[in-house]
Amino acid sequence: MLTLYSNIKQLVQIENNSEQKNSVKGKEMDILPCMDNAWLLIENDRIKDFGSMHSFPVGLSFDQEINCTGKYILPTWCDSHTHLVFSHAREHEFVDRIHGMSYEEIAKRGGGILNSAKRMQEISESELFDISLQRLHQVMDMGTGAIEIKSGYGLSTEGELKMLRVIRKLKDQNLIDIKASFLAAHAFPLEYKENHEGYIKLIIEEMLPKVVDEGLADYMDVFCEKGFFNVDETDRLLSAAAKYGLKPKIHANQLYNSGGVQIGVKHHAISVDHLETMDDEEVACLQNSNTMATLLPGAAFFLAIHYQPARKLIDAGLPVALATDFNPGSCPSGNMNFILSLACTQMRMTPEEAVNACTLNGAAAMELQHQLGTIARGKKARFIITKPMSSLAYLPYAFGERVIERVVI
Ligand code: NIG
Ligand code: FE
């Protein structure tokens, strides 16, 4: 089946196969290769070809034509950091925060991640799957074409396996690309509050072998943060995961300078994520690495803490990805369009930088850059068709408005 999308006002984030990039960094991030007045040819689930309407190939055959006058086409969003599999919303904690409690205080009294972990014990695997699938459809409808999903609300062997099996069942639906991260090291469960060693041992000796044995995880994640897992514990967990070939993607420097960036880079992490709190030392450390800096401005927005220093990172020549962090505590939204707007309004990223961060760099943060993230011949045909709009900048500008007309997956 050959489908031609014709008269596209602008085809965004195009890439010629001879110049395929793994990611874009620094000044390059402000360059978004686009073609005005373009056509795009899709064969089944792959991008076959594209070009300018001015040089439309004579005799090009296709089965159907979709006219895109006035509209933009761009690759679907690659959301490289989510906790989409969770049991219940936590709006009561949201109200507690309005009344003055901090995220940390709520966590200390047994709320936060532990609250979600308690609810995780109570829900059946099939119910968890059903609500997670609903959420997956929701984010796909908002333009997400690849996603990473973490465990981390199980905090017991049984609970973590339940979450990871649900993620695998989501993968089995063959809707979009999904990567699974094993995040048992998200918080210390109550029964191990005074026995950190015991929980680390449980993760390394009992959970990890089972997770690997069932092939349930693509990555290892640790919440490296004051009050959660310290650098030494993170180091040991990542070393244990490395023995099984699990690469790290970790939570670092959300609330404090946790040392998470350095330990992530030491272990060749695919990405270090959050990064609200960054000094020159962390920036220098990333400069000497292949690790992606993944920023989660939705969490900074929702917790009302300061935003990640995107300008500082990009101006230092680094690659930056953007993701939602979709979770019930710090960002109950999986809407990448809002993330795009936040990046521009709050972190002073240009629309071009933000689109690069949500597409190619997001794909790279899941090692999917050869399949997704740009409009390139042979890549998977997953793209967003916008409503007619005046310029690409309208996309982050019109926050809260549904600018997407259709998501093709
Ligand atoms: O990425 N910071 C750690 N984990 C999540 C929040 C989890 C929760 O509050 O449920 C995050 O923000
Ligand atoms: Fe997170």
Image (cartoon, helix red, strand yellow):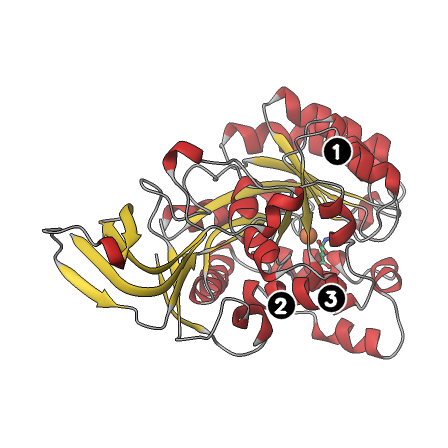
- Say which residue appears at 35% left-offset and 42% top-offset: 379
State whether label 3 is within 8 Å of ligand 1.
Answer: no
> Mark 2 sits on what residue?
341
Distance CA(mark 3)–CA(mark 1): 24 Å
Distance CA(mark 3)–CA(mark 2): 8 Å
Q: Secondary structure at mark 1?
A: helix
Disc number placed over residue 325 in the picture, else none = none
Q: Secondary structure at mark 2?
A: helix
- Say which residue appears at 49% left-offset and 32% top-offset: 215
Q: Residue 125 appears at what percent x and percent y?
A: 50, 54
Give the vertical position of 284 relative to 30 (above or below). above
Q: Residue 318 appears at what percent x and percent y?
A: 70, 40
Upstream in the sequence, badge 3 or badge 2?
A: 2
Q: Is residue 108 left or right of residue 333?
A: right
Q: Are marks 2 and 1 in contact (CB under 8 Å)?
A: no
Q: Residue 314 appears at what percent x and percent y?
A: 71, 47
> Mark 3 sits on what residue?
346
